[in-house]
Image (cartoon, coloured by chain):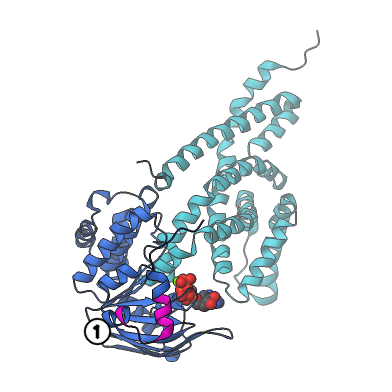
């Protein structure tokens, strides 16, 4: 379970998140939708303190953090409870696929090397990359790199996995393999928050949806309800535009 | 008959000059080693923007880059003993050190390390900053501490980035150590001057020593490019 209560974030005067409150049940997937610049990335980055939120409360499992009182220990605890999958994959370029997945286990969790290696290899196999374990990121395609980064996120058994537009940097023909891996991870009962522009995908995997605009939650609730009969006009317009079949303009 | 030079003397004196090659290489490698530690420390101070010390580091780098190496060599050679002598006499600190017992070569290594450290710090700092921000964030998000992140992810990539620069510095340093005879360290250059003065075959001896410098630099360049090739395994691009 993860719960955010009245989360606010300012960049100087710019109020980027406004009293954001949301809750994701254990094992559920929440999709965060919204136009560009609405604060979706900032929201995810505040959860693990890549950005320090200005005020509010973050609860993950039994951990509860009042953000303006958060000390280093609380921040490290939040980071241990979460994992992030980035748009740009952000694999460590000086490590092989296997080392990328292992490093958190051996360095952060102090797991013995052989055990960490076994676990990492199983995770790489799960995302279909067992045969690429000794490849450096520069020799993997974008889709493969993103799947390694999903394995890296899974390795630390986080309470919640945060995905920030995991397919937005990929060539169209590579999107499918990554979405399939994410769907697999979702099916295994992981709690996840996904920021995505792939609405068809969101409709498939998400249990709940949050629609964000200018840092404000415009609408949130059951995914089926929001996709089929959104209450808010702004949500409806966004979904209409985004789900409308793509038309080439000449 | 009048000869341009005594070709034989070029070769007969070479072994005697070569016997001092360990001094030249020792000062070079010693200084590189110490300067790497200095450069890394200064670079990290700048990257982490450590208050106050950061400005002292900036002052140090600016001073070193703005003064000649030979002057720095003299400053260290004459200044350091004076400084410690003052501290002892005025404050009773560190005890009385007999600087006559410290071989001049130690001052040479010290001066070169201080000099190279300033230049290296800038190179290392900019190399750290070229490692993309995303890898910092990924490291932080899986719970690595800043130190672990530096050691395991950022520095290995940054140091690889400076390898060519590092190699060039090493080769320049081999040549620049020819200054250390000025503080009476007998390196290959110093030995050449001594032999030249004794035999009056200055031209021949300087030809010998240039050949030695030249071959040393060629050999080092070979070794360095081989090392670099090995270190770069992970940068090979997608081949399939
Ligand atoms: N480090 C920063 N400093 C100042 N402003 C920032 C910073 N990061 C984001 N912002 C601002 O915060 C707002 C929200 O940005 P954010 O990246 O969270 O949007 P987003 O919903 O993820 O957009 P996109 O769909 O384009 O990724 C934007 O107006 C952006 O300019
Ligand atoms: Mg974003």
Name the image quarter holding the N terminus of chain A. bottom left
- On screen, residue B4 above or below B25: above
Residue drawn 67% across and 40% down?
B178
- On screen, residue A227 above or below B84: below
User: Left or right of B135: which side holds A203?
Assistant: left
Q: Nearer the viewer, residue A79 or A220?
A: A220
- Residue B172: tell me if it is visible: yes
Q: Which chain is blue?
A: A
To which residue does mark 1 refer?
A: A25
In x, y percent, where is residue B173?
62, 44
Q: Quadrant of residue B110?
A: bottom right
Q: What is the secondary structure assignment of the residue under circle 1?
A: loop
Counting the numbered discs, the total is 1
Residue range corresponding to the magenta coloring: A228-239
Q: Residue furthest front?
A: A250
- Residue A49: tell me if it is visible: no
Identify the chain of the residue marked 1, using the numbered disc in the image: A
Residue A235 highlighted magenta (yes or no): yes
Q: Which chain is cyan?
A: B
User: Left or right of A80: which side holds A118?
Assistant: left
In x, y percent, where is residue A84?
35, 70
- On screen, residue A241 above or below B77: below
Residue drawn 62% across and 26% down?
B14
């Amino acid at each position: 379970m993860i719960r955010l209560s009245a989360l606010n974030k300012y960049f100087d005067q710019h109020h980027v998140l406004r009293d954001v409150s949301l809750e994701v049940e254990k094992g559920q997937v929440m999709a965060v939708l919204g136009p560009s610049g609405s604060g979706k990335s900032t929201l995810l980055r505040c959860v693990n303190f890549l950005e320090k939120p200005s005020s509010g409360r973050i609860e993950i499992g039994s951990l509860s953090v009042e953000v303006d009182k958060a000390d280093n220990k609380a921040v490290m605890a939040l980071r241990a409870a979460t994992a992030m999958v980035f748009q740009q994959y952000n694999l460590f370029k000086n490590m092989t696929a296997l080392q990328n997945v292992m490093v958190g286990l051996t360095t952060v969790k102090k797991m013995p090397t052989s055990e960490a290696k076994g676990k990492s290899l199983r995770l790489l196999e799960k995302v279909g990359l067992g045969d690429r374990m000794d490849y450096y990121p520069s020799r993997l395609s974008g889709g493969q790199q993103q799947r390694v980064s999903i394995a890296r996120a899974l390795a630390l058994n986080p309470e919640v996995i945060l995905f920030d537009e995991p397919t937005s940097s990929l060539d169209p023909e590579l999107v499918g393999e990554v979405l399939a891996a994410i769907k697999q991870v979702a099916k295994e009962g992981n709690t996840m928050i996904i920021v995505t522009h792939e609405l068809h995908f969101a409709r498939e995997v998400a249990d709940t949806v949050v629609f964000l605009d200018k840092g404000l939650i415009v609408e949130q609730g059951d995914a089926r309800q929001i996709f089929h009969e959104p209450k808010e006009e702004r949500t409806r317009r966004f979904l209409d535009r985004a789900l409308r079949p793509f038309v080439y303009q000449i | 008959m009048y000869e341009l030079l005594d070709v034989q003397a070029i070769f007969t004196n070479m072994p005697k000059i070569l016997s001092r090659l360990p001094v030249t290489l020792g000062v070079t490698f010693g200084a590189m080693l110490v300067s790497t530690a200095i450069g890394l420390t200064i670079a990290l101070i700048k990257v982490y923007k450590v208050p106050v010390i950061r400005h002292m580091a900036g002052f140090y780098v600016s001073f070193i880059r703005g003064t000649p190496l030979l002057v720095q060599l003299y400053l260290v050679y004459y200044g350091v003993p004076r400084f410690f002598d003052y501290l002892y006499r005025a404050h009773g600190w560190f005890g009385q050190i007999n600087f006559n017992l410290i071989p001049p070569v130690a001052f040479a290594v010290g001066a070169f390390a201080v000099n190279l450290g300033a230049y290296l710090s800038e190179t290392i700092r900019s190399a750290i900053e070229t490692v993309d921000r995303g890898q910092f964030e990924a490291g932080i998000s899986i719970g690595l501490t800043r130190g672990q992140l530096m050691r395991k992810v950022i520095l290995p990539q940054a140091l690889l980035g400076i390898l060519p620069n590092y190699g060039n510095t090493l080769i320049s340093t081999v040549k620049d150590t020819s200054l250390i005879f000025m503080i009476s360290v007998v390196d290959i250059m110093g030995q050449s001057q001594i032999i030249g003065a004794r035999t009056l075959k200055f031209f021949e001896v300087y030809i010998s020593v240039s050949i030695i410098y030249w071959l040393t630099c060629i050999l080092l360049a070979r070794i360095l490019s081989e090392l670099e090739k090995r270190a770069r395994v992970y940068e090979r691009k997608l081949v399939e």
